[in-house]
Amino acid sequence: MHDHITLIGNLGSKPELTTTPSGQLVVNFRIATNSRRLNRATNSWEDVDPNWYDVAAWGDLATHAEKSLEKGQRVIVVGKLRMRRFDSQNGPRTKHEVVADALGHDLTAGSSTFAKRLRVRLDEGGADQRQRVGGAQGHGGMQGEAPPEADEPAPAPDEVEWHKPPVSEESEYQPPF
């Protein structure tokens, strides 16, 4: 059983599109969510430490996310929350993961242009012809596929993953606010 969650935050990494050995498309990225609160002593707003989530999107959603989202953008993620607990060399760890059902830009932070994909019959070569708003033709990727069910625990990330500096410590990261 998975909890459903809606997150609003900033992309902390560039979406990376990969293909699984079984041929499914998946995009992975990280999102940081944080709040602000009023410090009554100084009468100023302060950022609260961010929560980091790994996000995976599958099939057509993966392709669209990779083409539409960029590091630093404010986005909305709707999906299923998974929390993995495991032991590492540095003690017990917990990893928060979201399997996305829907993704989009947070329009309170800016504007976005939507290009709807139209489904039409297959052409003679077997390619699925798709048309963007405005008349541009394109060839789509795989049809939407559900992510593989993960009732068995996923393997723990290696120590290198856990020792990467947070995005906020990387020199190229520019906060969007």
Image: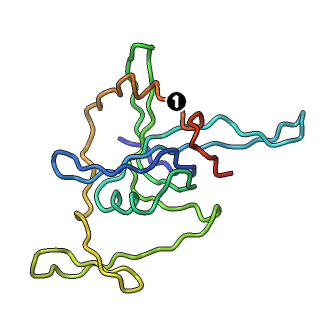
- Estimate the x, y position of residue 103 in percent, counting from the top left: 45, 59
Above or below, comparing residue 31 to residue 119 in the picture? above
- Estimate the x, y position of residue 95 in percent, counting from the top left: 44, 31
Query: What scheme was used to colour the molecule?
Result: rainbow
- At label 1, the amino acid type is Pro
Residue 62 sits in quarter: bottom left
Give the left or right position of residue 123, taking residue 109 as reference: left
- Estimate the x, y position of residue 13 in percent, counting from the top left: 48, 45
Q: Residue at x 28, y 58 (%)?
A: 59
Give the left or right position of residue 176, taking residue 93 as reference: right
Q: Residue at x 41, y 82 (%)?
A: 133
Q: Residue at x 33, y 26 (%)?
A: 156
Question: Closest to the observer: 29 or 100?
Answer: 29
Q: Residue at x 23, y 78 (%)?
A: 129
Give the left or right position of residue 27, taking residue 70 as reference: left
Give the left or right position of residue 129, taking residue 62 as reference: left
Image label count: 1
Q: Is residue 57 visible?
A: yes
Q: Which residue is mark 1?
A: 165
Residue 64 sits in quarter: bottom left
Question: Closest to the observer: 21 or 172?
Answer: 172
Q: Is residue 7 visible?
A: no
Q: Quadrant of the N terminus?
A: top left
- Estimate the x, y position of residue 52 in percent, counting from the top left: 52, 38
